[in-house]
Image (spheres, rainbow, N blue to C red):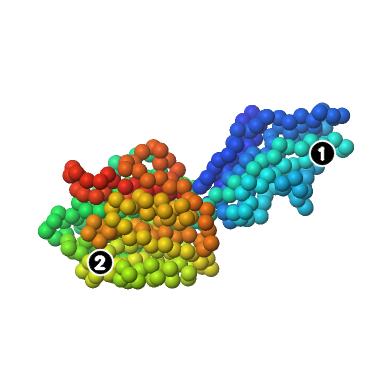
Amino acid sequence: MSYQVRARFGRYTCSILLAGMLLSGFGCGSSQNLTGSNSKLTIYGPPNNVTTPLGQTATFEVFARGPGPLSYQWERNSVAISGANQSSYTTPPVTASDTGTTYAVIVSYGKSSITSVPATLTVGPRSPLAGDLRFQQVDSPAGAVQGYVVPIQLIYPLGISYPAAIGSPLRMGPGQCVTGVAQDCWWDYDLWPSPTSEPVSTEYVPDTYEKLATDLSPDSPPFQWLGGNAAGNIVVTSLDIETDEDVFGDSMVKGPAGGFDMKYQTASLQDLPAAIADDGANGRVVTAISFNDAAGDVVFLSYGWTSEAHTAYDTEVQTVPYDDIGPAAKSLSSSGYILTAFGGNGPDGYILVGTKVQGDTLPRPILISPKYSDSTAGYALVGWAVNVPSGAASSPPVWIFEK
């Protein structure tokens, strides 16, 4: 998801690439003046460096003036690009090998010409398509954290729906239930206003364990609270089953794009990586996962999407103790994975599911923090856990932010 924005400062205009990455050279730079027979030919807005996600295009633009109509010839690594004769040039979808290439433009009037300073293209990790609800809002305007928010609590039996807000996944770990007291559980989550540019609604639902499978049916009442799922535009983003307490909780988001279909699945921990890999190879993304100790297996939810039905995904599953959550998340991001599902508990361990388009290798930016701070601005909160009930000696909380 990328947006090209022009910012005008006096006489200067710059192109700024927003959404996952931005970021290079958005000060407009200085004018370039011809030193020759026609000093009226001037480049006053040279092309800027651009960072763009893998698989998307990049646009370079020049602003020049002269005594009459101007002509343009763009060059890539000092070689003329056939047909690139306008004041702006948009590349084909970029590949990893394109990073570091340079783009310059020769501006001409009559026999006079001037060549701009070169701009550099940097290729960043691939962004999910706009409207893809399966990637925990990574690189989505709706998922960009805007600073600290005090956690809110979901308390059984009260579900809650937010019609214009984006919420985090449920926090994982012990301390969410009163030991030995059935159905006495709660879960923390955070919430931010949903931007008008990409509206998202969020819902949190607790219920009894016996209703787990029926509540996660797309026609169930929880989905109806968000206005129904007839268009397939609701995705469950986290799941926590507390079988000893006879309850479970989940979070779900609803977006403007439809065409998502959910599959409810179970597998042993040993068979889980192969089952998730099969989903990925068939264009499905796992978005929520939890141990089901009563059944002795793992419950996970995967989604296909009609808008990207032919994309195959690589997956990686790691099950780790609490203190290894951060290193496992960093390991996944360093190989280009987005953390699309996170769940678990102290006794069983914590499951991290990474998903990426097959063949992607570019590392993804990630922040692992023991606290929530303004430094996370622009990242999506993709998972978090607390080791023990508040007030007890423990390992620090783990917050996982990715973009």
In the image, 17 versus 122, the foreground residue is 122
Residue 244 pos. (x, y %): 17, 63
Q: Secondary structure at mark 1?
A: strand
Residue 267 pos. (x, y %): 32, 71
Residue at the disc numbered 1:
108
What residue is drawn where x is 82% and y is 39%? 108
Residue 7, numbered circle: none
Q: CA distance from mark 2 to mark 1?
A: 69 Å
What residue is drawn where x is 48% and y is 70%? 282
What's the residue type where badge 1 is placed? Ser
In the image, 393 versus 155, the foreground residue is 393
Residue 224 pos. (x, y %): 33, 62
Q: Residue furthest left?
A: 180
Foreground label between 2 and 1: 2
Residue 34 is left or right of residue 89, and the answer is right
What's the residue type where badge 2 is placed? Asn
Name above or below for residue 112 compared with residue 82.
Answer: above
**Can the viewer see residue 402 in this picture?**
yes
Would you call the spot at circle 1 few (<14 residues within 10 Å), some (14-19), or many (20 or more)? Answer: many
Residue 163 is left or right of residue 307, and the answer is left
**Can the viewer see residue 137 in this picture?**
no
Q: Are marks 2 and 1 in contact (CB under 8 Å)?
A: no
Marks 2 and 1, the one that precedes in the sequence:
1
Residue at the disc numbered 2:
292
Name above or below for residue 52 compared with residue 228.
Answer: above
Residue 300 pos. (x, y %): 34, 66
What residue is drawn where x is 20% and y is 64%? 243
